Amino acid sequence: MPDQPGTRTEPPYWVDRGRRRGLAAWMMSTDHKRIGVMYLAALLSFFSVGVFFGFLMRLNLLSPGALIKAQTYNELFTMHGLIQIFLFIIPGVPVAFGNFFLPILIGAKDMAFPRLNRLSWWLYVAGALIVLLSLVIEGRPPDTGWTFYAPYSIRTPANISLAVFGVFVMGFSSILTGLNFVTTIHRLRAPGMGWFRMPAFCWTLYATGWVQMLATPVLAITLVLIILSRVFGIGFFDPARGGDPILFEHLFWTYSHPAVYIMVLPAMGIISEVVPVFSRKSLYGYVAVAVSALGIASIGYLVWGHHMFTSGMSDTARVVFSFLTFLVAVPSGVKVFNWVATLYKGSVKLDAPLVFALSFIFLFSVGGLTGLIIGSLAPNLHVHGTYFIVAHFHYVMFGGAGFAILTALHYWFPKMFGRMYSERRAKLGWLFLFVGFQFLYFSMFILGYKGMPRRYFDYPPEFRTLNIVSTVGSWILITGLIIIFSNLIRSLRKGPPAPRNPWGGKTLEWRIPSPPAAENFRTAPVITDMPYDDGPA
Amino acid sequence: MVDEARTATSPEDAGGSPIDALGKRTGMWFFLFTELLFFGGLFLLYSIYRYKFPADFHQAAADENLILGSVNTAILLTSSLAMALAVAALRRGEIRRSVRLQGTTIALGSVFLVIKGIEWGSKIARGIYPNGPTLLSLKNGEIIFFGLYFSMTGLHALHVLVGIAVIAFMIRFTRRGVIGPDRYARLENTGLYWHFVDVVWIYLFPLFYLIT
Amino acid sequence: MDGSGLERRPDETALSPNGTYVAVWAALLVFLGLTIVVARIHVAPFGAAANLLIATVKAALVLVFFMHLRSEGRFLKIMLGVAIGALTFIIMLTFSDVLFRR
């Protein structure tokens, strides 16, 4: 077979061939692979900053009697949330792995709008820097929580307008990315690749793209209104001027709930790619898995009120939103069942990508099932605003989408960077990460159930033991992250060269060299089969 | 099975070929969907607050000048006609006519903005603006009404301004032959944007001017 | 190059005769006049509903004829429906709160 190490004919995509060199060649590039790699580096850098803020928060909560002032703690959890959500997990899988692999997976040269893709990248960087600027410039860092609830977000003297403007810019980036992905999937699939011959990951990127386009603009207008309220005194959310703060929550969550599907749908797509490869079996129920992505996106659009059960909404609304929330569990369950069914009687190879993927299935299920508890009206009244919620969303966002990013990294690292990493170190890092994760977050379910509120800088002595467990868990988890990332970073230079198809995958990216050349395919592929059926490995 | 021996034979499977006018137009429609949801948030707020303060809205709307509003609506509708004709002219190869019609669109859009400025100026001069003295002395529902008025017509006017700038670029492209009868996607897309801005005003007009 | 021609390439939009565009414009102005008259008659709450209906008719005219929606594929029309539906659902669900507050 051609494309063994040493026999490639074209240089990797990272070699500059045009007029520009170095940083300019990268920042001005419209090549989806370069853009994906740059996004990945930025994402992981911001993630580290967010982890550091989380580390400080847990340090403060190690024992009763706070180490830092309440105001500082408010700023910490606000910036932790803003960074991890808007700078890391929402862009997340789509901008790093979607950008790198979507055109390859559908047999295209690049995205439908490569220059728009570059604009998305620039907007992401600009927005992220603006958000981080609000942390360091004169005035207080934002202290409202990442949710910016009115009226406090209108009245606090902190640097809210700047942070909110940064998020607005990033939202624009997200909208354009979604627009690009959806158009690309519509227009650029290779000959013979019908909709139901597309890899499942592409289906999730498609559904996510629609959510990005139809939900993010509502956040955008909400952010604009925060700025208008702060700067011009427009009182839509100010009761003194006839405004209703609950309307802020409606507008905010109308985006921010679909946002969690932006986070988790592509993540689920990764799992749908990895599980079949490491079971050496076709994805069970491919059509159901594809359609369930659309189902999650659609129903997920209509459930936002479950964040507001204690806000003062009408009983009618609460019943309606609770019912719809239960509905969205159905397509999610379809995916979980189909992954498990794929593994069943498969020839399972427990390599690092699968280890992370299996963790996703477990952690996401825990998070999802606790979501049903929270989605029920009566329990919600007790656990809203407690650590139960914090545990739930860390299980789905970190245990889910976060672990999916790690899965994708370990699955596609050989393809993207042309190197293999140490399996042993990857699994060791996983062990620390997984164990630390349980200590850090499971204890929070119990703390919340026992009544410990979230966003509090201190707590009464009765919660001491569990908080110690949680904080120690954070240290174990961070150790795991360090092992995992030092393994990958080291392997960039020192790992053994990767073969074209180390895992025996059947999708198109495994037919081109590791790493790919600047031009994805020498000749446009023609598809004649389902994505996971037998073919030359 | 994947057969890599065949080469790309049509623009559609060349991946990213610039000939894909349908792709570009689809992308533009998608962008308009996002704009619909963007304005939609404000329309949501309007509908809620109108439900809550029907009498106050009724009273506040008396401040609107129906003649100026109607004239502005007619102007924007006519500018849409001019834009549609401009695209058609370009497709038929009538370059100079297209340029004139694009210029007409800009002129009408500018008149719209001038009239809007006059309306705003009148209100501001009388202390009716966010945090203004007269405004704060009004009833809550009226304060909300004018908050919505300035936000929604302001956001709309911003979109008109951007549209005018984009059409100015299109005139340049038309004159230089960058766009033409066989490459009219950019002008068509500009037209889509301009018509969308017109549709937003078609709804804003009754909501602010016709509820007394 | 008439807009109804089946010889049109799939990526081309309808190209109507200028008269069609002018006729649509005239209809829009008529509806504008109608909506002002309806407002003047003060038939609340039907006046508000009627004016929104007229606005929708005007918007539909712009969409179908000026924006060439009539020559677009089925997919795009469906997705337009989805976008409008999304906004409709958002407004309806929010009203399920506001309408029924005690």
Image (cartoon, grey):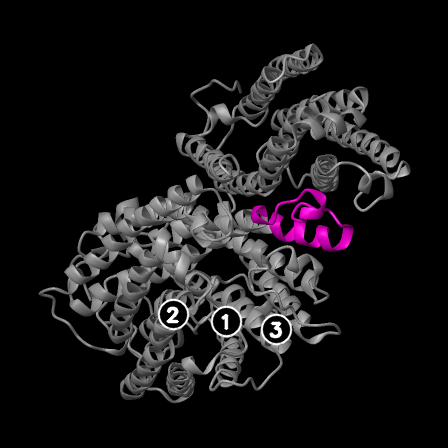
Q: Are marks 3 and 2 on the same chain?
A: yes
* Residue A227 is inside the magenta segment: yes
Q: Nearer the viewer, residue A195 or A358?
A: A358
In this view, the residue farthest toward the right is B125
Q: Amino acid at mark 2?
A: Ile
Q: Nearer the viewer, residue A36 or A235?
A: A235
Mark 3: few/some/many CA within 10 Å (<14, 14-19, 20+): many
The rendered magenta stretch, by its main secondary structure, is classed as helix
Q: Which residues are magenta?
A: A221-247
How many marks on residues? 3
Confirm whether the magenta stretch covers residue B38.
no
Callout 2: chain: A
Task: Establish whether labels 1 and 2 are both on one chain.
Answer: yes
Q: Which numbered circle lies on residue A405?
A: 2
* Residue at mark 1: A43
Q: Is residue C9 above or below residue A336?
A: above
For residue A503, side relative to residue A118 (left or right): left
Q: Amino acid at mark 1?
A: Leu
How far apart are the alpha carbons under marks 1 and 3?
Answer: 21 Å
> Are discs 1 and 2 less than 8 Å apart at CB?
yes
- For disc 3, the marked residue is A75
- Horizontal arrangement in the rendering, residue A498 relative to residue A132 (left or right): left
Camera-nearest residue between B146 and A403: B146
Q: Nearer the viewer, mark 3 or mark 2?
A: 3
Quadrant, the N terminus of chain A = bottom left
Residue A116: x %, y % from top left: 56, 54
**What x and y, as percent, mark residue A144?**
61, 65
